Amino acid sequence: MTSIRRRLTVALLGTIALAVLLGGAAIHHEAREEVDELLDYQLRQLALSVGDQVWGPGFVPHGHAGGETDFVIQVWGPNGVSLYFSRPHQILPVGSEPGFSTIETREGAWRVYVTRTPLQLIQVAQPMTVRNTMALAAVTRVLTPMLLLLPVLSLLIWVIVGRGLAPLRRLARAVALRSPSGLEPLPVTDTPEEVMPLVQSLNDLLHRLDEALAAQKAFVADAAHELRTPIAALQLQVQMLERATNDDERRGALDDLQAGVRRGTHLVNQLLTLARQDPDLTDRTKSPVNLGELARSTVAEHAVAADERQIDLGLTHVDDAAVIEGNADSLHILLRNLVDNALRYTPAGGAVDVAVSVSGPDAVLDVADNGPGIPPEDRQRVFDRFYRGSGTGETGTGLGLSIVKSIADRHGARVELGSSSAGGLRVCVRFPLFPRMKG
């Protein structure tokens, strides 16, 4: 498992170590330049002081005895005769040009200064290793305390990073303490701004979960309440069937029982349909849907039911340009519920008309009947679950239009209720056209 604390600590220590190394390189460069400048000055001063002395056989310059110094002094007369060599056994080439130069030998590099006077040629040399040693010593003196402090810095960084991550640990504990019945928002007081987007996202998720659980509880309570009545009716009808004393009573009781089973089955199917309409599942599978083709197939599958009820079910107009983006299965459920409702509330000998058209930027789906319709004061409430208007003469589940509204909302559609030309109900669902079908 990756540890943010460990990664931050290693990254910060690595950055500090790199900075120390780069700083050491810069210090070494600066120290070397200063050492070169200082020792070059000493070489020049030594050469000038040697030039001021009087040379003769066996003369030794003051303060420059052979092996007691890092400097090597050579003096030649005007005819090239060696007058003095501080290290007779040291082999050094003779510099020809006055001034400073660096000479490579088998023993390493030497820094040389040459000066000429009317009577002699003076050369003063120093091994470069001396300068390197002095520069390295300067860098070591600076970097050693910093390197010794790295373990202390490691501990301090570990503690500071741990404290910096404390809000995340508090957030994790707060989330862990949440229960399905306690989905209140996480506190945002004293929350660092870096953690705030995470807290806000979690609070939004908790809010959605709270709403979903509340809706689920309400749905389960309503479903249990609605199922109690048909189950009680079935029990009563079974008892009536048991008490029947002749064939006519038994047939009547059996017909009532079959009707009750059909109503119960329809209610259970509607409840399952409503429960399966999960936006997270259906919204992921959207594709272009031709409403005209959808209307043809839905009308065809309801033709037998319409004939049994002696209802004229048909298509009055179909525009194949009415293409929308959506989930085909959900849209089929929407239209099927509209047609089911129309057939249920339309009396025998009536008509149910389905039409598909394009109106401006919308694809319009119309289902009209000549049933009793819905009073204007009830047209908003019929979208509530399990609400059934009075005076319809039919015992529906009160879920059909609720399912229609739920599916329409997820497709960005509007559901409009009005009166048909025959005096019944007209349901108009307006969908936004598929983008490529516009204009």
Image (cartoon, rainbow, N blue to C red):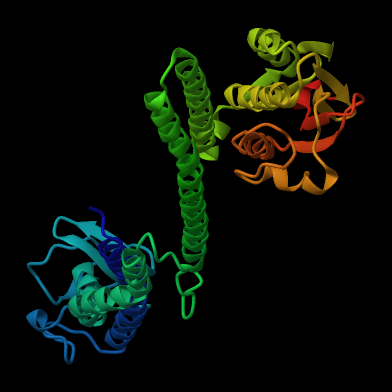
Q: Quadrant of the C terminus?
A: top right
Q: Residue at x 49, y 75 (%)?
A: 188
The quadrant holding residue 404 is: top right
Asked if 377 appears above or below 284 in the picture, the reply is below
Q: Nearer the viewer, residue 185 or 152?
A: 185
Asked if 54 appears above or below 214 in the picture, the reply is below
Across and down, in percent, residue 146 comes to 25, 79
The answer, for residue 168, to whether it is visible in the render is: yes
In the image as oriented, which residue stretches furthest toward the right?
Answer: 421
Across and down, in percent, residue 287 comes to 63, 23
The answer, for residue 439, to whether it is visible in the render is: no
Tell me if 85 is positioned left or right of 156 in this view. Answer: left
Q: Nearer the viewer, residue 429 or 358?
A: 429
Tell me if 190 is positioned left or right of 313 in this view. Answer: left
Tell me if 260 is positioned left or right of 353 in this view. Answer: left
Q: Residue at x 47, y 40 (%)?
A: 227
Asked if 301 appears above or below 87 in the picture, the reply is above
Across and down, in percent, residue 371 comes to 80, 26
